[in-house]
Every structure is written in C-alpha cells, then in structure tokens.
Image: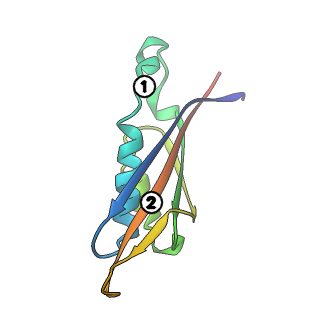
Amino acid sequence: MTVKRVILEMGAGNDLQGGDYTKAALRAVQDALHHSSLSFVSTLKVDKSKLLVEVTIGVQEPAKVDAAKVKASLPVGVVTVNVVKGGLDIPDATGGDKAVIASAAVQVMVDV
C-alpha cells in the first residue's frame, strides 16, 4: 500500500468564555474543512470510506479535548485524532476565566 497525502488544511477555533478546549478544537476542525473540497473523490471514483484522515489538534491542555467528539465531527474516512500541546490560552482581565484558541491540521491520504 502506497499512501499519499492529497490534502492538508489548517484551521483555528476558539472558545471565548468558559475555556472549553473541545469546543475550540471542533471549531478549528470545521474551519479547516471549510477551506477544502474533496472533488477528486468523485472525479477519480475514490471510495470515501477508505480515505485516511489524520487530525492533529494543538491546545494548551491536550487532556481536556474529547478526541472522540472531534473524530465524530469528520464526515468521511477512517479518522485518527492526535491532540498535542499548542494553541493559546488568553486569561481574562479579571482572572476568573480564559479564552482558548485551538489549532487544527487535517490531512487526507489515499492509497495510490
């Protein structure tokens, strides 16, 4: 099997109140998805269920991301989700809350 990457898209998402890393991660993935088109799937008659989709999420507290929710948000393919340290936390001026920013990289690979 020779797997080749055919799409790499990046996105950013945030949760401005509440510090919800999963919400920010989901928004980052959706941002990345809205930048791409899988038109090659129908043109080349690729089976969508066999696309390999690798998602990498960067946030300051990786353990607080529900990777299963992120995985479920992808519409096609065999999906893997990796959550790593990255992104940004921006503390509220009052010190009681924070805004969180997640980065996402979505890669789609096919067997050629």
Q: Residue at x 29, y 76 (%)?
A: 18
Q: What residue type is labelled 1?
A: Leu
**Between 78 and 65, which is closer to the camera in this rendering?**
65
Circle 1 crowding by C-alpha within 10 Å: few under 14, some 14–19, many from 20: few
Q: Residue at x 44, y 46 (%)?
A: 11
Left or right: residue 2 versus residue 33 is: right
Vertically, is 4 above or below 100? above
Q: In which quarter of the image is residue 83?
A: bottom right
Q: Residue furthest left?
A: 17
Image coordinates of residue 48 in percent, x first then y, are: 45, 29
Q: Which residue lies furthest to the top in this view?
A: 43
Per the image, label 2 sits on a secondary structure element best described as: strand
Whichever of callouts 2 and 1 sits on the residue coming sooner in the sequence is 1
Alpha carbon of mark 2 to alpha carbon of mark 1: how far? Answer: 24 Å
Per the image, label 1 sits on a secondary structure element best described as: loop
Residue at image mark 1: 38
Left or right: residue 73 versus residue 86 is: left
Left or right: residue 23 versus residue 45 is: left
Residue at image mark 2: 102
Vertically, is 103 above or below 91? above
Left or right: residue 19 versus residue 2 is: left
Q: What residue type is labelled 2?
A: Ala
Which marked residue is nearer to the observer: mark 2 or mark 1?
A: 2
**Between 26 and 44, which is closer to the camera in this rendering?**
26
Image coordinates of residue 17 in percent, x first then y, are: 27, 73
Vertically, is 40 above or below 34? above
Circle 2 crowding by C-alpha within 10 Å: few under 14, some 14–19, many from 20: many
Quadrant holding the C terminus: top right
